[in-house]
Image (tube, helix red, strand yellow):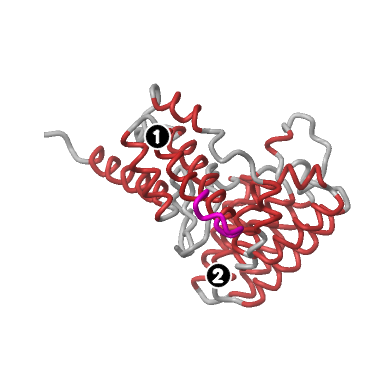
């Protein structure tokens, strides 16, 4: 995807690596209109092979966002997306990502948990960019789970409240790196969302119209993710029977046959919910675009 703004489906478009448990990328954001001209220029530069010039623009856009008061996800979404694309082919972009990741980690460990400057009470705390989530995002681009584990371990050692706050985001990396005991300490009840999923399944469609929010699919994805993490931790600690029992409890606990089947497909192939939802949305949009008659 070298040109234009990426198309996003409701659960995110991030590819899943074989054998890796990804946290569902539930929110999706559009880029900030303020930087559309700059972002278009970055695309042009990359297409022309002018990687250093493209990186220079992206470095400035990132610095601008970091110096902004209470920036939110839309303010950096396209910049991070473009950095990911550039880093796949251009090592200096990877160096830049490692540098900003390390800087974010030091600020986080010093107690500065939000990206950007404080000072805008109108921006709710939940909308602020958490430095740890940005670190995890960068490490995903760099395929560096070890770094995520290192930062989380330091939080576990000296900032346990923050470790509890960010554990859900860190768990996939902890599992991937084999830190099963640490993951077991921080993982929650993997079936805690089961009741809510069953309740919402009575009122919400699993596959809403293209412009509808896929709330049920998002909740099911989160539930299956928690179970997947739980199963991986149990197996990693030598408790395969308990892992199998957890999977069986999930399937038995879902009231809908449709949800049961989809949950099992998601357990077998992480990312299935995202792909199936996106495929249905694309198919529906194509059908809606057909002239009547």
Report which residue position mark 2 lands on: 45
Q: Can you name the residue that lies furthest to the left here? A: 293
- Residue 7 image offset from top left, x and y in percent: 44, 51
- Residue 28 image offset from top left, x and y in percent: 53, 44
Q: Which image quadrant is residue 122 in?
A: top right
Residue at 61% from the left image edge and 58% from the top image edge: 237
* Left or right: residue 193 compared with residue 121: left
Residue at 72% from the left image edge and 46% from the top image edge: 130
* Left or right: residue 264 compared with residue 125: left
- Residue 290 image offset from top left, x and y in percent: 20, 40
The disc, 1 or 2, on the residue closer to the chain's N-terminal end is 2
Which dot, 1 or 2, sits closer to the camera? Answer: 1
176 up-or-down from 272: above or below: below
Residue at 60% from the left image edge and 67% from the top image edge: 143
Q: Which mark is residue 211?
A: 1
Residue 113 magenta-highlighted? no
Disc 1 to disc 2: CB gap under 8 Å? no
Q: Which residues are magenta?
A: 235-242
Label 1 sits on a secondary structure element that is: loop
């Amino acid at each position: 995807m070298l040109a234009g703004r990426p198309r996003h489906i409701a659960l995110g478009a991030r590819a899943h690596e074989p054998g890796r448990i990804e946290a569902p990328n539930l929110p999706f954001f559009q880029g900030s209109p303020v930087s559309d001209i700059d972002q278009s220029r970055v695309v042009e530069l990359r297409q022309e092979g002018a990687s250093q010039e493209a990186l220079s623009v992206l470095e400035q856009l990132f610095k601008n966002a970091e110096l902004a008061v209470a920036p939110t996800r839309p303010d950096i979404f396209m910049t991070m997306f473009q950095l990911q694309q550039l880093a796949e082919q251009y090592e200096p972009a990877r160096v830049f990502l490692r540098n900003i990741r390390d800087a974010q980690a030091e600020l986080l460990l010093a107690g500065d948990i939000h990206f950007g400057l404080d000072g805008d009470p109108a921006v709710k705390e939940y909308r602020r960019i958490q430095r740890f989530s940005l670190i995890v995002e960068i490490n995903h681009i760099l395929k560096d789970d070890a770094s995520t584990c290192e930062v989380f371990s330091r939080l576990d050692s000296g900032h346990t409240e923050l470790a509890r706050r960010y554990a859900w985001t860190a768990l996939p990396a902890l599992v991937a790196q084999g830190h099963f005991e640490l993951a077991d300490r921080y993982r929650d009840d993997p079936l805690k969302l089961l009741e809510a999923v069953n309740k919402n399944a009575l009122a919400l469609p699993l596959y809403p119209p293209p412009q509808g929010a896929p709330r049920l699919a998002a909740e099911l994805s989160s539930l299956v993710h928690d179970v997947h993490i739980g199963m991986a931790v149990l197996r990693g600690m030598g408790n395969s029977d308990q892992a199998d029992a957890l999977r069986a409890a999930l399937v038995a606990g879902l009231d809908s046959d449709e949800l049961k089947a989809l949950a099992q497909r998601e357990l077998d192939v992480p990312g299935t919910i995202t792909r199936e939802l996106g495929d249905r949305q694309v198919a529906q949009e194509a059908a809606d675009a057909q002239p009547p008659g």
